[in-house]
Image: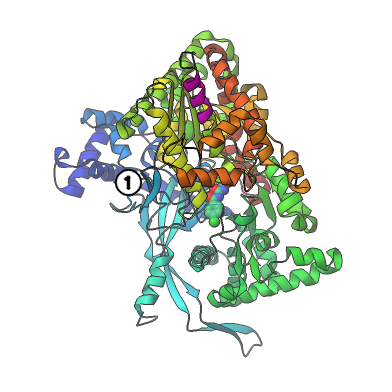
Amino acid sequence: MKLTTAQFKKDFLSEIETLYSTSLDDTTTIGQFIALGQLVRRYNSQSWTRTAKLYREHHQKQVYYFSIEFLPGRLLASNLLNLNLLSIVRKGLKELGLDFETISRSEPDPALGNGGLGRLAACYMDAMASLKIAGNGNGIRYRYGLFKQVFMDGYQVELPDDWLHHGNVWETRRDNKSCIVRFGGNVWLQPQPDGSLQAQYENTDDVLAVPYDVGIVGYHNDITNTLRLWSAELPPSVTQTYYSQAQRDRISEISKVLYPDDSNSAGQQLRLRQEYFFSSAGVQSIVRDFCATHHGMRSLGKKIAIHINDTHPTLVIPEMMRLLMDEHHCSWDVAWTLTTQVMSYTNHTILQEALETWPIGMFQGLLPRIYQIIVEIDRRYRAQQTPIFGKALVDLTAPLGNGQVRMAHLAVIGSHSVNGVAPLHTELLKTDVLRGLYQVYPERFNNKTNGIATRRWVQLANQPLSQLIDQTIGSSWRRQPDLLQTLLPYQQDDHFLHQLAQVKLTNKQALAAYVQRTMGIKLRTDAIYDVQIKRLHAYKRQLLHVFEILREYFVIKDHPDQPVVPRVHIFGAKAAPSYHYAKAIIKLINVVADMVNQDPVIGDRLKVVFIPNYGVSIAELIIPAADVSEQISTASKEASGTSNMKLMANGALSLATYDGANIDIMQAAGAENEYPFGLRVHEVYDYYQRGNYRAAAFYNGNPELKRILDSLINGTIPGIPTVGREIYDSLIRYNDEFFVLADYQAYVKQQQQISQDFQDQPTWQQRALANIAASGHFAADLAVARYADDIWQVPHDRLN
Ligand code: F55
């Protein structure tokens, strides 16, 4: 949109006046943020209305991305970027004596997700809007986001994340789009005079689902899509006059807090309530909107695509069946054909413990009608497939089995497409976790490698780099990230490489200032910034990284006068509150950090910082400053990873196992520009098959490694008698489930190589550039365009 600085200042001051009836100098920073947010909404309101109208008039096929988590990050700067107003607003505020960054930092960062899965959903929302796809998000408006993490005595302590304390400027409550979601009670099918059956309910617990819509602004294209987040409330008293306190609590609980768990099926009734709540409300509102503009249901499959992000929204399948049959009087066969046409499913994990299942007893009690429908899906599946594939395979793959509802099976059977998130991961789905279903439905399986929103992770998070790229190849890469490839020839341009190093230095200074201010730790900016940022999980092997720190520590202690290449090890990670082992690792990292950071012999040559409360906003600060990207999961365990892509796009070199999308990054940027190491998937699987992994053999065979492990239990690392023993035992007594010891030597070798290579800065910067130049491959826009073409079959803007 067109806006002058003068007009903006006028508008902003008038917004302040309207909201607070006072002058600018009498407002707080958060007050200024809210005024600015309101103003941006006003600037964009026509676009939001027009977009809905445009899609309606063109009868455009709508995509609904169902996800129990969305991690959008702060929206002020990204909305301004996408509206092309960022520099005007920055300038206008400056002229008013205000600092845009300060105001922007006061915006709460909605932590409505745990990690990669929730952030991916947010990157895809941004990409859909930017590609002019009629894309809608559907999720839960959690009253409290993922806990706020603080460290006390090195232990993780969880505090509530009251992100709505000052309200949310970006949301619009839409009471007229509310609907009722039913739980519990009894259900029966009542024969009707015309011979049909009508579902009848009694004694149900009814919950009012109220949508809050957030506009998702497309990049410079006048498109605003909608992210719809549902809040659970008491139904209006006309439908029921009295609610016991227990009932009230049960209702308000549903959207109260995000489950702080990743890769671990919590198996709680409340979680199942959350899943059905947003699945049912979402499908009801889709069907309602569809009916308002179409006669009959026939064209549903051509006009609607519903995407199931991991298994949590799988109940959209039986819910769609319920609505089509019970409310719209479709036959089973018609309903099933429409449902499978509409649905598609992405799997994000091969970890067995993360595949959701629900005990049948609990499920049936909570969702009796949905359970009936699943029983019928199961019956028909068995009847149809047993003659072809035999009972054994069908038992293994049916939606019901071992007294459980198996959500992944239901998702595959009720969808026309199933995808993994990196080529290796998709292969493992076919050959391992979902191999039975792959035999039955080979044509449904496909890969869609993850992607990231370059706009947020480069344009916004790394403005110095973005400016350098603009000066070098022009600004078209901002719309077409694949143009970053044209940077590659600048590998031969010494001046450019020098500027690239300067950009990194600037970003390190910003991070170092934050660490100094918030943690009181002084960091050198000429050190290697070695970064591992992701959820704390045994399979991600933060422990291996700690072993490297201890190794470096012992080297300096043993040879205090030998020169070393200075390093800063940076961690960001939250552990699920119930994940005892992950919390032990957090304590270990913090204790090692204190030991190292306070040792005068070590001085400024080695520092360890564990930045608390890792999330989208802290990632935006760390990633641009990174030299080394630690992607060191046990081969086969990390479905894709996405921090690997963000770090690469910001010029970090990956120190990486042959896992997930690391493999694709090596291919795109050239393995010579990364540091690959460690067991391959087939080696890990061989160990499993033969049962011949002996962690103790690595321990006994490597004195350096033995010294590190012993330091956990012999008092060398002070203050961890229990935690140290637990970790030691997990490796020696319980035989190191994630092959940390097997990969130690290869990992250390690459770490030593890094220290050597970093000293040749021109060559290092050439390799950083190779990563930046190849990062366009992993742009969310490209990934989403492939979903649009292959799975959703919806039109989108050309990418060039
Ligand atoms: C959250 C809740 C539950 Cl119950 C289960 C899993 C999660 C979760 O956060 N999973 C998650 O983040 N998975 C990650 O998805 C990313 C996006 O596809 C992948 O890159 C990453 O490998 C995978 O671990």
Q: Image quadrant for the C terminus?
A: top right
Q: Is mark 1 within 8 Å of ligand 1?
A: no
Residue at image point 73% right, 53% down: 444
- From the image, tell me which residue sits under label 1: 42
- Measured from the top left, where is residue 207 in percent x and y? 43, 72
Q: Main secondary structure of the magenta part?
A: helix
Which is more toward the observer, 124 or 226? 124
Q: Is residue 217 above or below residue 597?
A: below
- Compared across the picture, whether 92 is left or right of 349 comes to left
- Measured from the top left, where is residue 265 in percent x and y? 56, 59
Magenta stretch encompasses residue 782: no
Furthest residue toward front: 714
Q: Identify which amino acid the numbered label 1 is placed on.
A: Arg
In the image, the segment drawn in magenta is: 549-558
- Compared across the picture, whether 369 is left or right of 412 comes to left
Q: Is residue 265 above or below residue 671?
A: below
- Measured from the top left, where is residue 691 in percent x and y? 75, 47
Residue at image point 57% right, 16% down: 757
Q: Image quadrant for the N terminus?
A: top left
